[in-house]
Image: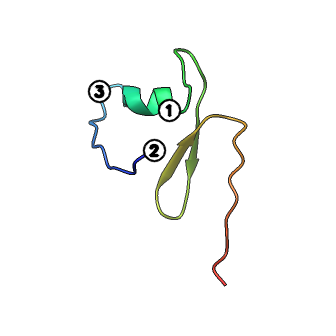
Amino acid sequence: MITFGIQKKIDNLGRIALPKEIREFYCMDENDKVEIVPTETGILIRKPGYKVIKIENE
């Protein structure tokens, strides 16, 4: 997947839509759950069950 930035507006109910290309790449279907995780540098949105590992630079 090519890294790129997409800007989306938050609607009046606090929602954003994930672009189709991202949903397809991560095999996300309608009614799938996502996990929203605050990080030091922003917000991480992922499918539950994904394991995130921090790799330290040597």
Number of labelled discs? Answer: 3
- Point out residue 33 in the picture as x, y percentages from the top left corner: 61, 25
- Point out residue 23 in the picture as x, y percentages from the top left corner: 47, 28
Q: Earlier in the sequence, mark 3 or mark 2?
A: 2
Give the label on residue 1, or none.
2
> Looking at the figure, which quarter contains the N terminus?
top left
Q: Residue at x 34, y 50 (%)?
A: 4
Foreground disc of the pair 3, 2: 2
- Point out residue 8 in the picture as x, y percentages from the top left corner: 28, 38
- Is residue 15 at least partly visible in the picture? no
Which quadrant holds residue 18?
A: top left
Secondary-structure class at tag 1: helix
Count residues near mark 1 (Cα–Cα under 10 Å), then give few for <14, some for 14-19, many for 20+: few
C-beta proximity under 8 Å, tags 1 and 2: yes
- Point out residue 12 in the picture as x, y percentages from the top left corner: 29, 27
C-beta proximity under 8 Å, tags 3 and 2: no
Badge 1 is on which residue? Answer: 25
In front here: 52 or 1? 1
| Distance of label 1 from label 2 (alpha carbons) | 8 Å
Foreground disc of the pair 3, 1: 1
Q: Earlier in the sequence, mark 3 or mark 1?
A: 3
Q: Amino acid at mark 1?
A: Phe
Q: Residue at x 53, y 48 (%)?
A: 44
| Distance of label 3 from label 2 (alpha carbons) | 31 Å
Q: Earlier in the sequence, mark 1 or mark 2?
A: 2
> Looking at the figure, which quarter contains the C terminus?
bottom right
